[in-house]
Image: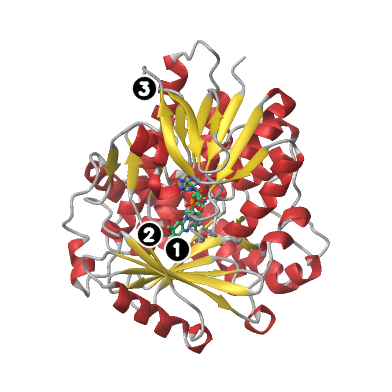
Amino acid sequence: MLNRLVIVGGGTAGWMTASYFKAAFGDRIDITLVESGNVGTVGVGEATFSDIRHFFEFLGLKEKDWMPACNATYKLAVRFENWREKGHSFYHPFEQMRSVNGFPLTDWWLHKGPTDQFDRDCFVMPSVIDAGLSPRHLDGTLIDQPFVEGADEMQGLTMSEHQGKTQFPYAYQFEAALLAKYLTTYAVERGVTHITDDVEKVNLDERGWISGVTTAQHGDIEGDLFVDCTGFRALLLNKALEVPFISYSDTLPNDSAVALQVPQDMKARGILPCTTATAQDAGWIWTIPLMGRIGTGYVYAKDYLSPEEAERTLREFVGPAAADVEANHIRMRIGRSENSWVNNCVAIGLSSGFVEPLESTGIFFIHHAIEQLAKNFPDESWSPVHRQLYNDSIAHVMDGVREFLVLHYVAAKRNDTQYWRDAKTRRIPDGLAERIEMWKTQLPDTETVFPYYHGLPPYSYMCILLGMGGIELKPSPALALSDPGPAEREFAAIRDKTRRLAETLPRAYDYFAAQH
Ligand SMILES: Cc1cc2nc3c(=O)[nH]c(=O)nc-3n(C[C@H](O)[C@H](O)[C@H](O)COP(=O)(O)OP(=O)(O)OC[C@H]3O[C@@H](n4cnc5c(N)ncnc54)[C@H](O)[C@@H]3O)c2cc1C
Ligand SMILES: N[C@@H](Cc1c[nH]c2cc(Cl)ccc12)C(=O)O
């Protein structure tokens, strides 16, 4: 039986993989995780997709177990500031788009917008976020979304099988390092062998398959399937197996980040329950509220900005609270491996690929890769079909997300610096130009977005197109011939619901303070 899994690397990717496979296969799988005591983890990575709750459910973990241990908060949207012009903001919320008579509400909004804010008119969440509220009441009940928690027919589905069925109203923000620590305990308690040591050599057999890894103090570790979770180093897949890396830098030029972890009195400050991405002269700054601190960082292209200038801008942006905090400068490898599974080696996490964290996709990529590996887990026959299906799925997810991110820059109206002007003339991925031409006349739907599963539903594309403001959009001509009454009633219903929620939901901080 093929059942010996060796994971190299103990960051978020390594421990998520170890925990998931123990939860999936129990004692029938033998897992060893080796992580260096000298090479650190990336140390950032804080905002997620809502889908990650399926991961926690799969492990049998409840919010009340893991959230306090990871200083976690709820994320109801990404808030984009200054992408259209200074002073403008809009949300990409976790909220299903309503549709009226077969047309998305945003289409009706284009036809006859009640205000100039599509997000506040078409969704409930933006006003909930503006007011700093929690999506759960103090007794734990969920904001009244068209959503049934724990519905039987949803159990055991992968993320791609879930897509389009429901939209859960929030994701999470947490300290990735604390999650890795939490999962270490989870995995070790369930029988994962944990070795702290440096892998110094990757041993290949005559076919070029990995026979084992040599560590500094624990000798050779042998296994059947090797999972490369060594971060940007990609020690097994890219270094030992020499699998080519496809850079996305021609379409996504941001290759650097500088991060600060700023302690804050969240009770006094309050929690805006979202991740904020504030556009800057040569990139953007993330702001992520956690319990006890905010995580923040400037993502930029070093062709346009030096690390010193980036750090200075970030410190000015944060203010005096950051004075004594040390900055963490990070070089980002943007792109993906040509194949993430080659022979008996699978790369998961930064070793497989990465795009800038604008839509918080890093941990989503890891979760997706784990689900796909579980689904395509090999046996002694090592069928190439499993590898092919896996590699296609990883490539589609990453290429699709790349396209979605590029759209942010192409659609942003801002053009006040060379960085933003160049964003309008830079090469864009094949197919995107045609799709944008189509979206100008007919808002994105399942038929016209990137044709493979990549985690993002069509309404996400609508939010970016409507919020960024640099591309002129037209409503469907059919709406001019249609009765506007039902759409007007829907806009009014959203206003009513927003008012009702503002009166009943607790403040986000108060909700978490009660949990801690
Ligand atoms: C600036 C930035 C912001 C990000 N923001 C987000 C976000 O908001 N949301 C999100 O989902 N994702 C985000 N990410 C991505 C996220 O941080 C990563 O996807 C996640 O932390 C996984 O990292 P990893 O485990 O692949 O690698 P790492 O954290 O780099 O871990 C690598 C591991 O390999 C080990 N290792 C390396 N060499 C050896 C060796 N020779 N022997 C033994 N062990 C070795 C190290 O000790 C370490 O344990 C961000 C990333 C960056 C760079
Ligand atoms: N499957 C993802 C897709 C998604 C839907 N809405 C949003 C909003 C944001 Cl900010 C990110 C991602 C998403 C999910 O449900 O998480």
Tell which circle, 3 or 2, labels the residue nearer the N-terminal end: 3
The amino acid type found where label 3 is placed reads: Gly
CA separation in Å, label 3 and label 1: 55 Å
Q: Is residue 157 visible?
A: yes
Residue 425 placed where, x, y %? 16, 57
Residue that appears at 40% across and 20% down: 205
The answer to whether residue 507 is left or right of residue 203 is: right
The answer to whether residue 133 is left or right of residue 298 is: right
The amino acid type found where label 1 is placed reads: Phe
Q: Which residue is mark 1?
A: 118
In this picture the colour scheme is secondary structure
CA separation in Å, label 3 and label 2: 50 Å
Tell which circle, 3 or 1, labels the residue nearer the N-terminal end: 1
Which mark lies nearer to you, 3 or 1? Answer: 3
Residue 466 shows which numbered tag? 2
Residue 280 placed where, x, y %? 33, 73
Q: Are marks 1 and 2 in contact (CB under 8 Å)?
A: yes
Q: Quadrant of residue 463?
A: bottom left
Q: Residues within 10 Å of mark 3 (few under 14, many from 20)?
A: few
Frontmost residue, 352 versus 277: 352
Residue 9 placed where, x, y %? 52, 45
Q: Is residue 343 above or below residue 54?
A: above
Q: Residues within 10 Å of mark 1 (few under 14, many from 20)?
A: many
Frontmost residue, 175 versus 49: 175
Q: Secondary structure at mark 1?
A: helix
CA separation in Å, label 1 and label 2: 7 Å
Q: Quadrant of residue 291?
A: bottom right
Q: Which residue is mark 3?
A: 208
The amino acid type found where label 2 is placed reads: Leu
Residue reaching furthest to the right: 139
Q: Is residue 386 above or below residue 510?
A: above
Residue that appears at 78% across and 67% down: 516
